[in-house]
Every structure is written in C-alpha cells, then in structure tokens.
Image (cartoon, grey):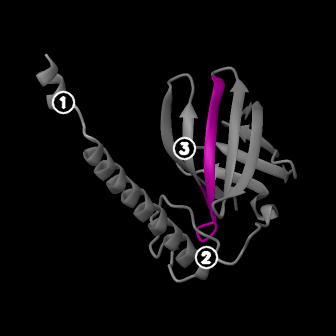
C-alpha cells in the first residue's frame, strides 16, 4: 500500500517547478495587460472601428453630448401606420412620449440614454392588448431614423422596426 501512495505523491522539486511556471505565466499576463493599457492611453492603438454596419449605431465622433431636441416631433413606423410622438426629454432620463396605433395607446414608461456615443430610446406600452410591449430604439442621425426592436408582449415576439420623421 505504501508503494501505491508514493507513486502519486508530488515531490517538493516537482511542486516548486509547477509554482515557478505558474508564477511566470501570471507575470507575463499581467505585463501584457499593462502594456496594452499604456498603449491605449498613449493613443498608439486605434480602438475605433473603421467600418459601420446598418445594425451598429452611428458614432458621433466629436460630440460628448447630444442635442435631444432634434428628436422632438412625430415619428411614423416604416411598415405600418403607427406613430410615436416625442414631446420632451427630461434631465433625469425620462421621456414624454405618446403612441398611436392609429388610436392612442397608453405609454406606461418612456426614457432615454446617451451611451456608447448613441442616443437610445425606450418606450413601454401599458394598455389593453399591450401589457408591457416595448420599443428599444437607436437614433441614426445620417438617415434621420429611429430603428431597433419592438417586443410584442401578447405574442411574445420581437420585431425589427424603424421610424422616420413625419414630414
């Protein structure tokens, strides 16, 4: 029995070797991460994307803020006669909005956020046949378009949607 125990026992030199290898691996990873952070802060690495797909929100290159007032107005869905009316952006992230399909549907919650250099809007509907249906939209300034997802709560289905400014 003692011979079988010795067979699986790790000796002190083997343990030291494994610890030394582990130490060098961790040191190498930490050093690589620090070099990457230093290059990014120096500006020697360009982390900006040079391509833009239709699903990626447009990056506003030089703006740290966004003029929300340009979104105030009526927006018509591109595939149906549904309308969002945005009347005011509040500083606390709330949004005053109305929804029509074509009759008025109660908006239970509406908000906005400017993050990742894109204006994002959320509108949740609370009405008969709209128990929590919601829109998650992003504004694309070069197309003057609000586009994103519509979750239809009754059917539990999500659709790709777009809204253009009413003329």
Counting residues from the start of the chain, the first of labels 3 and 2 encountered is: 2
Inter-mark Cα distance, 1 to 3? 58 Å
What range of the chain is rendered magenta?
Answer: 130-146
Q: Which mark is residue 133?
A: none
Locate the N terminus and report the quarter of the image it occupies: top left
Of tags 3 and 2, the one toward the viewer is 2
Residue 154: x %, y % from top left: 55, 22
**Which dot marks residue 149?**
3
Looking at the image, residue 34 lies above or below residue 100? below
Residue linked to disc 1: 8
- CA separation, marks 3 and 2? 35 Å
Distance between mark 1 and mark 2 Cα atoms: 49 Å
Q: Mark 1–mark 2 contact, CB under 8 Å? A: no
Q: Is residue 61 above or below residue 167?
A: below
Q: Is residue 5 on the magenta stretch?
A: no
> Dot 2, how many residues are within 10 Å of its Cα: few (below 14), some (14-19), or many (20+)?
few
């Amino acid at each position: 029995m003692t011979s079988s125990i010795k067979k699986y026992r790790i000796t002190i030199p083997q343990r030291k070797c494994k610890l030394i290898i582990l130490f060098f691996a961790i040191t190498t990873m930490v050093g690589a991460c620090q070099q990457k952070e230093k290059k990014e802060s120096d500006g020697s690495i360009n982390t900006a994307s040079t391509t833009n797909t239709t699903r990626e929100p447009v990056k506003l290159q030089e703006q740290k803020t966004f003029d929300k007032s340009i979104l105030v107005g009526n927006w018509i869905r591109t595939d149906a006669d549904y309308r969002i009316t945005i009347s005011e952006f509040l500083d606390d992230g709330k949004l005053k909005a109305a929804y029509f399909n074509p009759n008025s549907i109660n908006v239970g919650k509406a908000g906005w956020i400017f993050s990742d250099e894109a204006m994002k809007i959320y509108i949740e509907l609370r009405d008969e046949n709209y128990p929590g249906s919601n829109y998650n939209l992003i504004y694309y300034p070069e197309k003057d378009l609000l586009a994103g997802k519509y979750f239809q709560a009754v059917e539990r289905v999500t659709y790709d949607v777009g809204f253009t400014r009413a003329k």
